[in-house]
Amino acid sequence: MAMYNELLWIFTQLPDDYIVLDTETTGLPDENGLPDIVTLGITVVRNREIAETIEFKTQPQKRISDEAQSIHGITNEQAAAFESFDSQWQRIAGYLKDQLIVIHNASFDWPILLDHVERYGMEMPLIQGVFCSQKAAIPWAQAINLPCSPRGPSLDTLTKAFDVKDIRSEGKGMHGAEIDAKQTADAIEKIRERFRACQ
């Protein structure tokens, strides 16, 4: 497995300071458009160490599908008590400003976030860019025959492959925006350690 570590090179180009973003939503995109955000998690990485994790619970306008509820465990009744997205946007934007934003499956989460910003008439702060850790891991995962969808290896797959502590399992296996953002940060730093150890 070590002979393919050069395929992880792109991860070494990440800065020492970045943030990881994850969302849990009302479901998948459908004929009615993109789903609504139910929770948005942010992990702040400073000097390659996790400095902070935070989760914003936002009241969706759309109903949470049964499938989505089975994934993240949040019911429509619970979500009805959450604060609106626009009332929390300034705090969220403060974390994003001037940062590189890492997302596992950015092609899903990022358009949904931009849709919310536009829908509520908010303004996106200037950022350094968006890095998709899932797509970046595709060449390596394919080379060693790991399970890999067209989007790339799942976060669970990377967690097992790099022997990262599975904090999701502590929550009975349920997904969570804050948990998954932290899990992604842990996996990224493990990947970076693996690459450097082989240099």
Image (cartoon, rainbow, N blue to C red):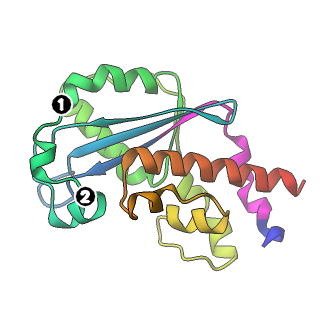
Q: Residue at x 51, y 61 (%)?
A: 155
The residue wearing badge 1 is: 83
Give above or below for 93 relative to 142. above
**Mark 2 nearby-residue class (10 Å; few <14, some 14–19, many ≥20):** some
- Mark 1: which amino acid? Glu
SS at badge 2: loop
In front here: 99 or 25?
Answer: 25
State which quarter of the image contains the N terminus.
bottom right
Give above or below for 50 relative to 112. above
Labelled disc at residue 116: none
Residue 33 in the figure: left or right of residue 151: left
The residue wearing badge 2 is: 73
Q: Is residue 125 visible?
A: no
Quarter location, residue 158: bottom right
Image coordinates for residue 102, horizontal then vertical, percent = 52, 42
Q: Residue at x 20, y 26 (%)?
A: 86
Magenta-highlighted residues = 5-20
The reply to whether the magenta stretch includes residue 73 is: no
Image coordinates for residue 87, horizontal then vertical, percent = 20, 23
In front here: 173 or 1?
Answer: 173
Quarter location, residue 160: bottom right
Give above or below for 38 relative to 160. above
Between discs 2 and 1, the one toward the N terminus: 2
Q: Residue at x 20, y 46 (%)?
A: 36
Image coordinates for residue 177, horizontal then vertical, percent = 38, 47
Q: Residue at x 36, y 51 (%)?
A: 176
- Mark 2: which amino acid? Gly
Q: Is residue 67 visible?
A: yes
